[in-house]
């Protein structure tokens, strides 16, 4: 049996809106948004990514009820969920929106709705229930990450550095972390002062996707000056280090 679900509150992963815009729309339509704890709003103000789904639906005699789950990925890797209840109070009436912090509050609000006890219940725990937000690999800090990516690619001197497509994608990043993956002084028999360092620049995009650029800093140049190269994969970066070292030894 097909059920005419109201899907206005469902905001799919591919939506171009930012986590802040999703939150603003949810709070703007919820009649009880003023009841949310200040601490909850403060945490969501720094959210890095958003996902949402229809959780359940109940339709009978012109009355309806839908439950949506909205989840935000926070800067510390934790996930915070708000539950939205959408319903009408009279058959064919305009939908009303309410928002709650936990499922117990949601169940209490649902129990007071004027839906017949023998009405069919359509629960969607498998088909459209939100998948858990994966924990990021890095401890990101929200900052001007898009500008960092731009400056990193600008100072790269290798002609095979990542191109415009990746640069455009990184322009949507909202946090990043730099980790030194490798560093070594010169080896015996090689030019004095020869050194290599490898850094991973991990970027978190607003949709939760993670992308890394691999930066090689070295002095394997004819005049011994420092040079920066950037690659899209760790393997390519390590191959470049070995190639540069072989050229100067």
Image (tube, rainbow, N blue to C red):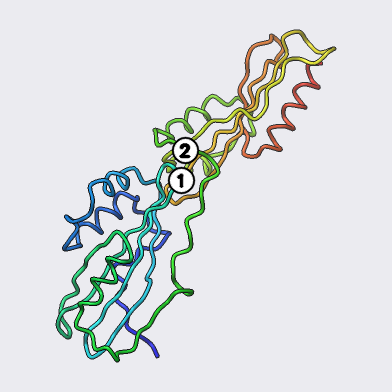
Q: Give the percent coordinates (x, y) of residue 13.
A: 42, 60
| Disc 1 packing (10 Å; few <14; some 14–19; many ≥20) | some
Which one is in front, 98 or 231?
Answer: 98
Q: Where is residue 9 in the image (x, y as percent from the top left)?
A: 29, 67
Horizontal and vertical percent position of residue 98:
22, 66
Q: Quadrant of residue 117?
A: bottom left
The vertical placement of 178 against 79, above or below, is above
Q: Which residue sits at x=30%, y=90%?
A: 119
Residue at coordinates 44% horizontally, 65% vertically from top-left? 130
Q: Which label is found at residue 77?
A: 1
Image point (58%, 36%), residue name: 213
| Quadrant of the drawing holding the C terminus | top right
Q: Earlier in the sequence, mark 2 or mark 1?
A: 1
Residue 226 disc label: none
Disc 2: which residue: 140
- Residue 188 vertical placement versus 90 (above, below): above
Q: Looking at the image, do the residues carrying marks 2 and 1 touch, with CB atoms under 8 Å apart?
A: yes
User: Residue 56 is drawn in which quadrant?
Assistant: bottom left
Rendered position, 114 above or below 164? below
- Residue 196 at x, y = what percent? 69, 20
Point out the image quarter for the N terminus.
Answer: bottom left
- Helix, strand or loop at mark 1: loop
């Amino acid at each position: 049996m097909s059920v005419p679900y109201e899907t206005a509150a469902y905001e799919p992963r591919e939506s171009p809106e930012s986590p802040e815009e999703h939150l603003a729309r949810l709070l703007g339509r919820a009649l009880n948004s003023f009841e949310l704890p200040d601490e909850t709003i403060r945490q969501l103000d720094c959210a890095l990514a958003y996902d949402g789904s229809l959780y359940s639906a109940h339709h009978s005699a012109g009355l309806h009820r839908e439950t949506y789950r909205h989840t935000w990925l926070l800067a510390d890797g934790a996930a915070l969920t708000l539950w939205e209840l959408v319903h009408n109070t009279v058959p064919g009436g305009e939908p009303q929106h309410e928002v709650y912090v936990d499922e117990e509050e949601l169940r209490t609000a649902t129990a007071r709705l004027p839906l017949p006890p023998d009405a069919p219940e359509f629960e969607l725990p498998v088909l459209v229930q939100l998948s858990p937000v994966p924990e990021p690999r890095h401890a990101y800090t929200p900052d001007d990450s898009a500008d960092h990516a731009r400056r990193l690619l600008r100072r790269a001197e290798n002609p095979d550095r990542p191109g415009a497509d990746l640069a455009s994608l990184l322009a949507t990043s909202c946090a990043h972390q730099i980790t030194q993956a490798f560093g070594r002084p010169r080896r015996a028999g090689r030019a004095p002062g020869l050194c290599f360092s490898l850094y991973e620049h991990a970027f978190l995009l607003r949709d939760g996707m993670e992308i890394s650029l691999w930066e090689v800093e070295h002095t394997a140049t004819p005049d011994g000056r420092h040079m920066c190269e950037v690659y899209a994969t760790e393997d390519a970066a390590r191959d470049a280090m070995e190639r540069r070292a072989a050229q100067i030894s």
